[in-house]
Amino acid sequence: MLLPAIILVSPMYDRWEMRDLRFSTRARYGLRAMLELALRYHPSEPIPLVQVAEKQGISEGYLEQMMSFLRKGGLVRSVRGAQGGYILAREPARITVGEIIRCLEGPLGPTGCVSEENPEQCSRAESCVTRVLWERVRESVAEVLDGTTLEDLCEDTNKIRQSKEADMYCI
């Protein structure tokens, strides 16, 4: 499934700074890490971060930073010790991509004036035709992200794997 690109409003960026209509590396890598945890999900078996890092090709240090955000956001639990690692805080079917993206990046919004939380005040708001367009873009992206769970991505992953296996069969 391809997700539409959008600007994510983040307190890290000055409102005058232009950003591409793309998800950040943190959002993309964080989603991949969460998908890895979902693919290997068992409520009582933590997955060591080093295994997630190796499987997804993400530096362990960067992954640790993202997991801190996800843990504070209530999406993962950490388990300390020799058998420690990370576990999803809920079943994959109960965690949406929208929750993950918002946890890592903040509220969705293609422009500051239509951000999901605390939209910027604009003197043109009442007569701005493009504002309506940006609201529709935000709502459409939110609908896709909030309507997609980690379980959905696990199913898509399995379909891709099965398709690749079928393509490898030769007579």
Image (spheres, rainbow, N blue to C red):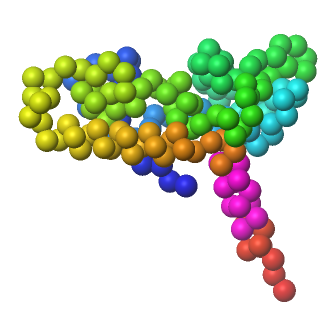
Residue farthest to the bottom? 171
Location of residue 81 in the rendering, given as x and y in whole percent from the top left corner: 88, 13
Q: Residue at x 66, y 24 (%)?
A: 75
Q: Is residue 45 magenta?
A: no
Q: Nearer the viewer, residue 161 or 123?
A: 123
Magenta stretch in the rendered image = 153-163
> Residue 146 vs residue 83: left or right?
left
Q: Nearer the viewer, residue 131 or 67?
A: 131
What x and y, as percent, mark residue 42?
85, 34
Q: Is residue 162 magenta?
A: yes
Q: State whether residue 52 is above or below residue 65.
A: below
Name the side, left or right, on which 60 lies relative to 86. left
Q: Position of residue 155 (x, y in %)?
A: 71, 53
Displayed quadrant of residue 156: bottom right
Residue 67 visible somewhere in the drawing: no
Residue 129 x %, y %:
13, 41
Classify residue 76 as left or right of residue 119.
right
Magenta span: predominant SS is helix
Q: Residue at x 38, y 18 (%)?
A: 12
Q: What's the residue at 29%, 38% (across, down)? A: 135
